[in-house]
Amino acid sequence: MSIPIIERLDIIPQLTPAGTAALAIGLVLSDGYTAWGACVGDDVPATLAEADNLLNQTVRIGLRGQPAESLGQMCGRWAHRTAITPRTEAVAPLAPQVADPSRRQLLRGFQPESINPTETRTVLVDAPLPKALAYGVSQACLHAAAHAHGRTPLAQWQVELGMADTPVAAVPLMGDVAQVEPTAVLGQISAVAYTVPAGDSAQLIGRDGARLQAYVRQLGTWLGQTAAQQPLIYVDVRGHLGTVYNHFAGKLLGAISGLESSCTPHQLWLGDVALGPKAAEVLPSLRDFVRQRRLKTALVGRAPLGSVAAVRDWLTKGQVCHLEVWRFGSLAAVVEAVQVCRAAAVPVILAGHGQETAASAALLTDFALAAQPAFLYLPHPALAYNHQQQRLAELNGR
């Protein structure tokens, strides 16, 4: 069986489910097949022309004329490449200037305000491909490899992960609390996620964490009255607990114990209890304290995890890895991160972006079915639920 060659890369405008502008990548193979991927993430290029220029300097150079052999091999041909792109940045402020008042303003005692203009300049930066763009390209690479070998995307994921002989079972689903209120949705998920907003930590969670504890208690009560099962509660505190307790491990342990009691009988996972330079000092000892006290709460890393190196580092500090796939750029890097976690027996939350398309959500669900993480987290879990049911029905019918 000959492997088709990548003849060209196309990029076209798209719309997200929310109606915002998006981009799609197409790899055109020598046998006429086009493998598509969706550019999803927080750094999607603003224009089609900008994205096309970046692809010219990186992906097209690496992939044109190459065989569509595997995700890892195709991503390896472009993931290391950088592109020169213009970027606007601020420079040192100019000397303060005072606006010239009119004669009438002077007679009325007008006090002119000082103006501090900021000068900007456009510089050329040699930088990696934006992660959203790399995510879209690597989706297309996975589809191309699956087509080249006559496999389904799920089967190709199993090969990439080295898990071709691992049984496929339904993956527990996680959804945002704001999206799971309908009883039908709540009945099909195994975990409910809430992310504390950005802002003043003391105001958001209370100076002693009392507001956060009250919210967790209310959430547990609501789930107890509504959900048919007892879904896990996952709260991403975005470093607020560490800020409020000045990154003191003993006080953080007390706060975690109180939160765990508040949501009983639901299990609690806490994301990013502490962030920043001080987190590296407090998290290892906090993890040990949690284990010594035999608390059921797990410490989850999210914000720091955007590379395989960061995942390896987190394994020395926490207990669960929350992998937002688009932040890794290349899906080949996510495959490696999942393999690192499996080798260390560390649970994984495999998570998508809030703007995942139906096609990219389906590919991510296939990834989860192959990788068997602790949870598959999509803000809108219905996308994952529907595709997972279809895939399992196909497998069970064979």
Image (tube, helix red, strand yellow):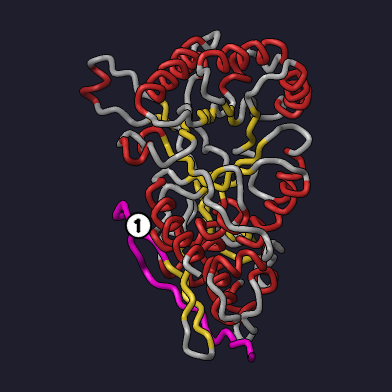
Image position, residue 73 (x, y; %): 69, 73
Image position, residue 71 (x, y; %): 64, 70
Which residue in the protein does label 1 denote?
Answer: 16
Identify the residue at horizontal 47%, vertical 89% (top origin): 32
Rendering quarter of residue 301: top right
Does the magenta run of residues contain 142? Answer: no
Image position, residue 345 (x, y; %): 74, 43
Identify the residue at horizontal 47%, vertical 19% (top origin): 216
Q: In this picture, is 27 found above or below 348?
A: below
Task: Count how many numbered circles sit on residues in the image.
Answer: 1
Q: Secondary structure at mark 1?
A: loop
Viewer-side residue, 227 vs 331: 227
Identify the residue at horizontal 58%, vertical 57% (top origin): 168
In the picture, measured across the screen, residue 318 lies left or right of residue 386, that is right
Image position, residue 259 (x, y; %): 55, 16
In the picture, measured across the screen, residue 212 lies left or right of residue 182, that is right
Q: Which residues are magenta?
A: 1-23
Identify the residue at horizontal 52%, vertical 52% (top origin): 121
